[in-house]
């Protein structure tokens, strides 16, 4: 087994921590403490996107572990660079999104004083947090191209789409024509395309 420094393990671990810390802080400081975190994380069939996330993320992490313990990631330098770029973009977008719009929950639900946010990254795409997860998934699959990581990345991207659609339904129901107008101006995940 190669030392962790030789196969990018420490760098990947640091980038994972940088990506996940804002979410942990956001969930810990959320406005709706009456909803317990463990209740939000319980997979429900009606929360298919969340269930996909709960399958995808461990698959990616297990894939990282297998890759590391079985001789390293064996990534070409260009794969590492591309993976790092995707991770940094995902982390920056996630941080920016959480800073601009503090009313984010694990499940698709609104807090009592929820305001429709169309500023910052929400003026570029309607679901920048789900875009951030997709960027992180792509970065993972490029950097550590192992079957479990690739499968986890695909499930995370599909889960992001499912979660974005569920969240948009909740927002349409709450904000009506205001949200429909926002949908006409701003694309869901890919600026100017989709």
Image (tube, grey):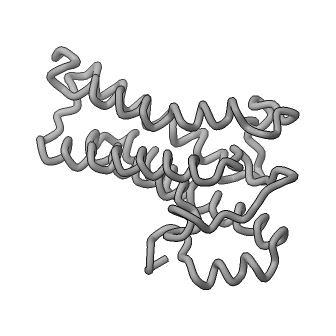
Q: Residue at x 34, y 26 (%)?
A: 66
Q: Nearer the viewer, residue 176 or 61?
A: 176
Q: Residue at x 77, y 73 (%)?
A: 172
Residue lying at the far left of the rendered structure: 77
| Residue 177 place in picture, x, y as percent | 78, 82
Q: How many marks?
A: 0
| Residue 173 place in picture, x, y as percent | 83, 71
Q: Residue at x 71, y 61 (%)?
A: 167
| Residue 105 place in picture, x, y as percent | 71, 45
Q: Residue at x 40, y 39 (%)?
A: 148
* Image: 94 above or below 193: above
Q: Please state, as top left, top right, bottom left or bottom right, where the N terminus lies in the image.
A: top left
Left or right: 14 as drawn, with respect to 74: right
* Image: 178 above or below 82: below
Left or right: 117 as drawn, with respect to 131: right
Left or right: 69 as drawn, with respect to 78: right
* Image: 173 above or below 24: below
| Residue 94 place in picture, x, y as percent | 49, 48
Left or right: 77 as drawn, with respect to 53: left
* Image: 29 above or below 188: above
Q: Nearer the viewer, residue 163 or 105?
A: 105
Q: Nearer the viewer, residue 145 or 20?
A: 20
């Amino acid at each position: 087994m190669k030392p962790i420094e030789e196969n990018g393990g420490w760098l990947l671990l640091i980038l994972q921590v940088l990506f996940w810390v804002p979410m942990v802080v956001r969930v810990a400081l959320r406005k709706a403490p009456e909803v317990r975190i463990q209740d939000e994380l319980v997979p429900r069939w009606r929360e298919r996107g969340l269930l996909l996330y709960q399958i995808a993320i461990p698959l990616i992490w297990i894939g990282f572990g297998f890759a590391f313990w079985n001789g390293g990631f064996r990534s070409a330098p260009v794969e590492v660079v591309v993976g790092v770029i995707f991770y940094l973009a995902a982390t920056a977008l996630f941080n920016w999104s959480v800073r601009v719009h503090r009313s984010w929950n694990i499940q698709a639900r609104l807090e009592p004083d929820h305001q429709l946010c169309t500023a910052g990254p929400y003026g570029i795409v309607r679901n920048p947090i789900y875009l951030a997860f997709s960027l992180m998934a792509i970065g993972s699959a490029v950097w550590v191209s192992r079957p479990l990581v690739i499968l986890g990345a695909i499930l995370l991207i599909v889960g992001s789409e499912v979660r974005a659609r569920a969240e948009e339904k909740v927002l349409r129901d709450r904000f009506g024509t205001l949200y429909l107008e926002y949908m006409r101006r701003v694309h869901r995940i890919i600026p100017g395309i989709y």
